[in-house]
Image (cartoon, grey):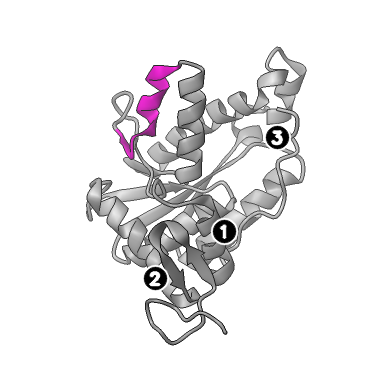
């Protein structure tokens, strides 16, 4: 016998959340997902209704779920999508296509930073340098710079990123065991600008497990990338 949703008591439960003692049908899960993001934003005062909020869109499931859910949670807020194309053959164009599809269905403006067009360099070029074994670190540095550039162009003062609960826990343990205590500051839900003119960083998914972002995208049919980064293996 199937289990009924504990919220509506009508539909069959498909999503089981042991930590919350909830078994939900798809519709109630989607409502739960959006409301949790709304509560997270409000609890940490991540932005106010008059601010333009930039959302860093990688093409992946987390940032896709984030933008889609934010649009539902705050229908009167203005959001702008920001995407960085790193010039990785096939992969980067695939990710940009997904970002463009997402921007279209959520009805938000999309700003794209193309690394080749802007700097005449591709991420892969760094594999021929002394940074070849730290390509993921290089990628992160480039994207942080590029998102700040895009934020200025879009007149954005608040930047939302798709860091989820799993990301935060992983970063916390890595920082702890490597004794990089100062890095733990970056785990805050809201990070003030590092310097004048830079954005305030927010993490609306900080209380959301990675698996639930995937389920949200699948149930809502939100587009996200179907390829893995070719540079991620062996790093």
Assess whether mark 1 and mark 3 are in contact (beta carbons under 8 angstroms): no
Q: CA distance from mark 3 to mark 1?
A: 20 Å
What residue is drawn where x is 65% and y is 50%?
Answer: 95
Q: Which mark is residue 232?
A: 3
Q: Callout 1: 10 Å neighbours few (<14), some, many (20+)?
A: some
Q: Nearer the viewer, residue 59 or 155?
A: 59
Q: CA distance from mark 1 to mark 2?
A: 15 Å
Pinpoint residue 117: horizontal percent, then vertical percent. Answer: 63, 35
Q: Nearer the viewer, residue 129 or 12?
A: 12
Q: CA distance from mark 2 to mark 3?
A: 34 Å
Q: What element does badge 1 sit on?
A: helix
Instruction: Examine the rendered structure and indicate whether residue 129 appears above or below residue 13.
Output: above
Residue receiving disc 2? 31
- Sequence-wise, which precedes: disc 2 or disc 3? 2
Magenta highlight on residue 184: yes
- Sequence-wise, which precedes: disc 1 or disc 2? 2
Q: What element does badge 3 sit on?
A: loop
Pinpoint residue 86: horizontal percent, then vertical percent. Answer: 64, 36
Pinpoint residue 115: horizontal percent, then vertical percent. Answer: 62, 34
Residue receiving disc 1? 214
Q: Callout 3: 10 Å neighbours few (<14), some, many (20+)?
A: few
What residue is drawn where x is 72% and y is 50%?
Answer: 227
Which residue is outermost to the top? 130
Instruction: Examine the rendered structure and indicate whether residue 192 appears above or below residue 99.
Output: above
Q: Is residue 164 visible?
A: no
- Sequence-wise, which precedes: disc 3 or disc 1? 1
Which range is magenta? 180-191
């Amino acid at each position: 016998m199937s289990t009924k949703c504990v919220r509506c008591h009508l539909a069959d439960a498909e999503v089981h959340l042991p930590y919350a003692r909830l078994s939900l049908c798809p519709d109630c899960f989607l409502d739960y997902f959006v409301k949790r993001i709304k509560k997270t934003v409000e609890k940490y005062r991540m932005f106010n209704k008059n601010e333009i909020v930039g959302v860093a869109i990688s093409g992946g499931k987390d940032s896709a779920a984030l933008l889609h859910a934010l649009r539902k949670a705050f229908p009167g807020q203005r959001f702008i999508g920001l995407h960085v194309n790193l010039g990785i053959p096939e992969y980067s164009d695939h990710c940009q296509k997904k970002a463009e599809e997402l921007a279209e269905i959520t009805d938000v403006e999309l700003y794209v930073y193309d690394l080749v067009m802007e700097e005449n360099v591709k991420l892969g070029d760094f594999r021929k340098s002394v940074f070849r074994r730290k390509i993921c670190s290089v990628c992160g540095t480039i994207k942080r710079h590029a998102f700040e550039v895009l934020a200025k162009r879009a007149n954005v003062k608040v930047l939302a990123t798709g860091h989820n609960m799993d990301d935060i826990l992983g970063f916390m343990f890595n920082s702890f065991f490597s004794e990089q205590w100062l890095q733990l500051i970056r785990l805050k839900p809201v990070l003030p600008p590092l310097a004048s003119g830079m954005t305030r960083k927010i993490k609306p998914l900080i209380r959301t497990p990675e698996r639930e972002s995937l389920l949200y995208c699948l149930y809502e049919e939100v587009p996200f990338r179907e390829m893995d980064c070719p540079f991620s293996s062996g790093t």
